[in-house]
């Protein structure tokens, strides 16, 4: 479970996040919505440890991780992907995922036995590729995948870290419209199997309403609205902020 | 492990080893010492390529670690002549170069791209200045002569240097080169090697999957520097004399040249480059006093016409001759 308690983030005199509080329980998928400049990416960076809050606390499974480094947070169970895909492009698709699996098993610092010789890690990586329908690309370099498959691989890599809390920044951006729901089905299915608490930044309201239990609307650094997708869509302030219209 | 031990690469290595072991039967003693030089430099080129190909950073100062290894041998002889054995000399080469590369690397790996390269160059020049100016300790520009050592207690008294080089030492060099190649192959294919490549491909993502990027790059730097030190130690016996020039920027540039000549994208490329460079420099020096023009000219041609080096060119040609199959990559 992730808890964000009264978090404030200021850059010089500019207040980007102003007293935000929310929590995400195990097996819960929450969407973070908001217009450009609302502070979504700052919020994600605060949770992943790339930024330190000016005040407030962040707790993971009850443990205060506010001052933990990004590395410590990863080891405690936080994983994230990025809006723009970040792969190890010259490594094979299998090695992209296996590197994450080996990292999760604290086996990356080993020097002499070839990575392929770590049978359990390799099998686990292949199983993850199977879940994300990427098995057939195992031996191809990451750079040779289509944009949509790169995005899926990006998400598969975060899954390989077996996180307790997952931050997904637009997991379907770049994916062909016809494949978006298939990709989300795969992600949600995998989340469900591990019971991972998940925060998704997503602009596609169809995806939000189909896959997220709760929605947080961030505007000018504060939570403007929160509730189920339907409740938020019925909220005139959220409508105006997100779509520029109100009934 | 099994699949790569019995791969075509393993078969190729076995054949290459057999050829190397049979060379004394067909090559003149003079050419045998050239092969020895090439093999010892190949260890260094493999070391540099760990940083260039697998960590994605280019060092222009690896002469410093080569010199650290060579001077460890020289100073051992200078200050502990009664204990001057080959095995101790190799341990000193490995230890001193590991220590120097750990210190220098600690500074360098905090940066990437041009900043990394400039720092490595600056630190190599610092090493050059120390070796050149500390005359009473290092012999200054006169350098240090390297006599024949003992081997596990066996005295080589009565054996002339040339006999030693074309006799037992050749097989020792082949053995050390083979071991170093296998160790480096294991390292680049290990989880550490894959993590290192991950840091090269995407540093931000590497951090986000739990790789301590600077620490891993530092480990790679130390391994790379230690390979150079081993190379310097082995080479010092072949050359018989060491001077501060081996830590300077010209020699450091030559190491980069070897790797580019052979091709840095393929694991074996630096080995080919070191061998070719040894012969190219020899014939260029014999042909003209402006031999550096030939070396420089070939580098320009290489970058323009054969950016993948000799092995990259061969792999590209082989891929073109086999339609439907991609080019090999190390």
Image (cartoon, grey):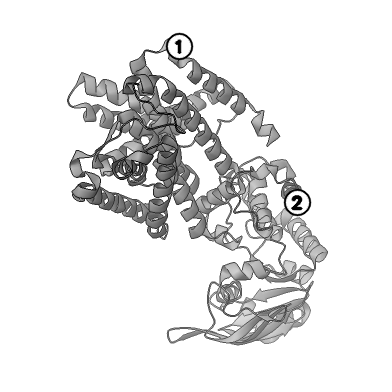
Name which residue lies at 34% across and 26% down.
Answer: B278
Name which residue lies at 74% across and 67% down.
Answer: A206
Residue that badge 2 annotates:
A124
Image height check: is B145 above or below A107? above
Instruction: Pick whichever, B239 or B88, lies toward us.
Output: B88
Residue that badge 1 annotates:
B25
Circle 2 residues within 10 Å: few <14, some 14–19, many ≥20: some
Name which residue lies at 24% across and 51% down.
Answer: B130
Q: Classify residue B196 as left or right of residue B118.
A: right
Label 2's element? helix
Q: Position of residue A26 (x, y in %)?
A: 78, 74
| CA distance for labels 1 and 2 | 51 Å
Image height check: is B117 above or below A43? above
Instruction: Pick whichever, B315 or B73, lies toward us.
Output: B73
Nearer the observer, disc 1 or disc 2? 1
Q: Position of residue A137 (x, y in %)?
A: 69, 42
Q: Position of residue B295 (x, y in %)?
A: 27, 29
């Amino acid at each position: 479970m992730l808890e964000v308690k009264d978090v404030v983030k200021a850059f010089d005199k500019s207040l980007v996040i102003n007293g935000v509080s929310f929590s995400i329980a195990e097996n819960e998928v929450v969407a973070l919505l908001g217009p450009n400049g609302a502070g979504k990416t700052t919020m994600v960076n605060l949770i992943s440890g790339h930024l330190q809050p000016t005040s407030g606390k962040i707790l993971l499974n009850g443990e205060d991780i506010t001052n933990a480094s990004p590395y410590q947070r990863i080891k405690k169970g936080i994983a994230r992907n990025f809006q723009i895909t970040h792969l190890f492009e010259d490594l094979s698709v299998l090695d992209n995922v296996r590197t994450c699996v080996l990292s999760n098993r604290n086996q990356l610092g080993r020097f002499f036995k070839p990575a392929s010789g770590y049978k359990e890690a390799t099998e686990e990586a292949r199983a993850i590729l199977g879940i994300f329908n990427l098995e057939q690309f195992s031996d191809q370099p990451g750079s040779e995948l289509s944009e949509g498959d790169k995005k899926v691989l990006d998400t598969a890599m975060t899954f390989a870290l077996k996180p307790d809390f997952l931050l997904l920044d637009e997991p379907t951006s770049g994916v062909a419209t016809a494949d978006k729901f298939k990709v989300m089905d795969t992600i949600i299915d995998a989340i469900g199997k591990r019971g991972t608490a998940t925060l998704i930044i997503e602009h596609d309201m169809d995806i939000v309403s189909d896959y997220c239990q709760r929605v947080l609307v961030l505007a000018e650094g504060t939570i403007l609205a929160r509730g189920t997708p339907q409740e938020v869509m019925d909220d005139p302030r959220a409508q105006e902020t997100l779509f520029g219209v109100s009934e | 492990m099994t699949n790569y031990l019995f791969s075509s690469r393993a078969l190729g290595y076995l054949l290459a080893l057999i050829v190397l072991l049979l060379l004394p039967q067909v090559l003149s003693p003079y050419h045998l010492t050239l092969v020895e030089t090439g093999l010892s430099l190949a260890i260094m080129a493999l070391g540099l390529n760990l940083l260039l190909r697998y960590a994605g950073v280019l060092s222009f100062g690896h002469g410093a670690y080569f010199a650290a290894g060579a001077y460890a041998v020289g100073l051992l002889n200078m200050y502990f002549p009664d204990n001057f054995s080959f095995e101790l000399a190799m341990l000193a080469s490995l230890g001193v170069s590991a220590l120097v590369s750990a210190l220098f690397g600690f500074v360098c790996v905090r940066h990437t791209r041009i900043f990394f390269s400039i720092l490595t160059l600056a630190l190599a020049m610092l090493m050059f200045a120390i070796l050149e100016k500390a005359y009473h300790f290092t012999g200054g520009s006169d350098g240090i002569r390297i006599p024949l050592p003992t081997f596990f207690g066996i005295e080589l008294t009565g054996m002339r240097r040339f006999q030693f080089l074309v006799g037992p030492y050749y097989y020792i060099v082949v053995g050390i080169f083979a071991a170093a190649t296998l160790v480096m192959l294991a390292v680049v294919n290990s989880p550490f090697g894959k993590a290192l490549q991950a840091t090269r491909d995407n540093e931000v993502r590497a951090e986000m999957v739990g790789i301590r990027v600077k620490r891993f790059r530092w480990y790679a730097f130390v391994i790379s520097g230690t390979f150079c030190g081993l190379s310097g130690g082995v080479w010092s016996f072949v050359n018989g004399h060491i001077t501060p020039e081996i830590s300077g920027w010209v020699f450091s540039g030559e190491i980069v040249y070897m790797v580019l000549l052979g091709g840095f994208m393929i694991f074996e490329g630096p080995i080919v480059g070191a061998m070719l460079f040894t012969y190219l420099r020899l014939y260029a020096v014999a042909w003209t006093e402006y031999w550096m023009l030939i070396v420089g000219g070939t580098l320009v041609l290489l970058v323009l016409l054969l950016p993948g080096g000799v092995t990259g060119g061969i792999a590209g040609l082989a891929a073109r001759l086999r339609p439907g199959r991609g080019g090999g990559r190390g």
